[in-house]
Amino acid sequence: MSSEKTTELPLWVQDRDIVIAHDEEVQWREGKRPDYSYTNEFLHQESKFQHPEGSLEAIAQNLVRNFEMEASNKSNPQQWLSIVTDKFKMSTNGGQQYTAQDVAVEGTYNLFLGESEQYSSETETFESSFQVFHNAFPNGFLWELTEVLSGPPNVTFKWRHWGTFNGSYKDYAPTGETVEIVGISIARVSDDLKIESLEHYFDNNVFLQKLTAGGCPFHSQNQ
């Protein structure tokens, strides 16, 4: 069966629920394992790509999902299995490079989005930044890899991030529409498939405009 093939792969390129289950002495941010069972239902329903188990696409997708899970839920980057901790660097659109510790302190949303009219990372904490987007996308802000363009050691791949805008974004009312953003990333990986660096390229302004352009701000409705 295919499960035998899966167990031959390093843990960090297997399904993230398997990684979560191997949590001996892990410092979880909320004191317990994260539970993806609810958002997994929407992920399975709405994903456009079903990559064959053991394929380069499936391996790369699992690796990135595990990185996102660890960055969001493991407070100590030394416990992140998906990266080479002392080498790891992450950047967006050719901007500043951040370490794993930067990601652990600031959060991926703050480092990805920075400062704009629609979002200010300087006024958001790690916790508040995740709450903002959890409120906007109560069914999850889902991610999947769409295509691998080149293999290791520099894995270049296309991806899509999407969610149904059913909750409020700050003072802006939900539209009920699907908000999607697409991008390209380059993950430089070690011989054992751990991430040494991540470069992301996408238009974050388009994403934020979709959250603020369609609905009327609540405070305007209440005036």
Image (tube, rainbow, N blue to C red):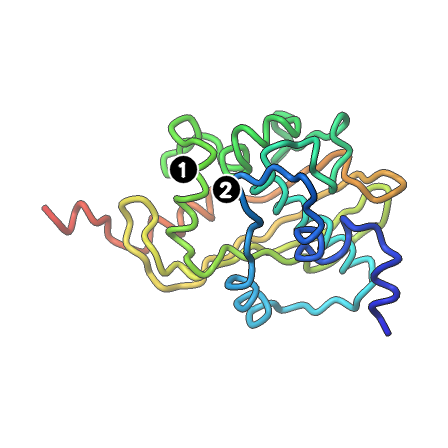
On residue 128, which mark appears? 1
* Number of numbered discs on residues: 2
Residue at (46% x, 48% y) in the render: 207
Residue at horizontal 76%, vertical 25%? 86
Q: Amino acid at mark 1?
A: Ser
Q: What amino acid does circle 2 point to?
A: Glu
Residue 50 placed where, x, y %? Answer: 70, 69
Figure quadrant of the N terminus:
bottom right
| Front residue of this view, candidates 98 and 179 | 98
Q: Which residue is mark 2?
A: 30
- As drawn, the label of residue 64 is none
Task: Tell whether label 1 touches label 2 (CB within 8 Å).
Answer: no
Q: Where is residue 122 shown, x and y percent of the image? A: 42, 26
Please tell me how crowded label 1 is: few (under 14), some (14-19), or many (20+) other residues with Cα within 10 Å: some
Q: In 3D space, how far apart are the residues under numbered discs 2 and 1 (Cα atoms)?
A: 14 Å
Q: Return the residue found at the far front.
A: 25
**Foreground residue among 29 and 205:** 29
Q: Which residue is painted at 61% across and 35% down in the image?
A: 92
Front residue of this view, candidates 160 and 82 = 82
Kind of element beneath mark 1: helix
For residue 121, above or below residue 35: above
Question: N-terminal of the two: label 2 or label 1?
Answer: 2
- In this rendering, is residue 101 above or below 188? above
- Residue 110 image position (x, y, % from top left): 49, 34
In this image, 217 relative to 68: left or right?
left
Looking at the picture, how far across and down is residue 34, in whole percent? 56, 51
SS at badge 2? loop
Give the class, few, some or many, for how many residues have Cα within 10 Å of label 2's Cα (few <14, many ≥20).
few
